[in-house]
Image: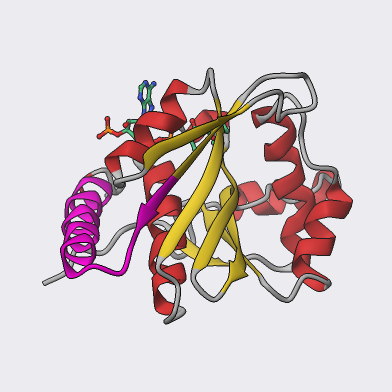
Amino acid sequence: MSPVIPYTVRPMEARDVPAVAAIERLSFPAPWPISTFWYELTANGTGFYFVLLRPTERPGGGRWKRWLTGMLGLPEETPVIGYVGFRLLNDAEAHITTLAVHPDWRGRGLGELLLLTALESALARDPVRRVSLEARASNEIAQRLYRKYGFRFRRVMPGYYRDGEDAWLMDVEVRETAYRERLAELRRKLEARLSAGRPT
Ligand SMILES: CC(C)(COP(=O)(O)OP(=O)(O)OC[C@H]1O[C@@H](n2cnc3c(N)ncnc32)[C@H](O)[C@@H]1OP(=O)(O)O)[C@@H](O)C(=O)NCCC(=O)NCCS
């Protein structure tokens, strides 16, 4: 039986954008402005964006906190703790445009869950054969994550970022049976890890 993970990943909606942009600002030296997320969601028909939500509270749990928040007129705490997105460049290629987890939630397998979601979603769009992305040359954490999912370094894009840092272009061929099996195995291990961390 598949373990039940305590996190939800669902398509990004317009109401998620402020929380997503806030995580973006905490995560990148040259963050996307909020207008770019609006554009990706509304005008760019080739974009696919997902948000990760914090574990749901048990029924009745958090009732006092919500009551106090309402009484004090404070803004409701957002459930969004991460996001990922990709664009279809053409029939054969999907390009991951963004991926981030809120700093308080990193190191628990959630970046992996988001990357896996994007890869599975890209694979579900049939002619897609390759998934590509750019990572900062200095971003060893992201590069390790991508290598774990089979991405290979292709080339340097000199001065790609606004602050002048180089990007690494990385990609992975996704259509082979062996790669689909690798993804399924990675999901099985990840779900076991995430469900083991489930609050009781
Ligand atoms: C990159 C990022 C999304 C990873 O998310 P995360 O939830 O912290 O990562 P996970 O816990 O899912 O770890 C997945 C893998 O990433 C790598 N990784 C994660 N944290 C790491 C660390 N501190 N040191 C080295 N590798 C690390 C490992 O390969 C890890 O696999 P493992 O657990 O089998 O070792 C997150 O660090 C982030 O939001 N960074 C800022 C934004 C960013 O750089 N996005 C990528 C743009 S290219």
In screen coordinates, is 22 left or right of 123? Answer: right
Q: Does the magenta stretch include residue 68?
A: no
- Per the rendered image, the range of residues in magenta is 171-195
Report ligand 1 position as a quadrant. Answer: top left
Q: In the rendered view, does 176 fall on the left or right side of 76?
A: left
Please tell me which residue lies in front, 50 or 158.
158
Residue nearest the viewer, comparing 176 with 97: 176
Q: Where is residue 126 in the image (x, y as percent from the top left)?
A: 42, 82
**Tag count:** 0
- Residue beneath the point at 56% across and 39% down: 134
Q: Is residue 108 visible to the viewer in this orientation of the structure? A: no
Within the magenta stretch, is there residue 188? yes
Residue 14, position in %: x, y? 78, 66
- Residue 108 vertical placement versus 7 (above, below): above
Residue at the image position 49 percent from the left and 71 percent from the top: 92
Q: How is the image coloured?
A: secondary structure
Position of 160 compared to 162: left or right? left
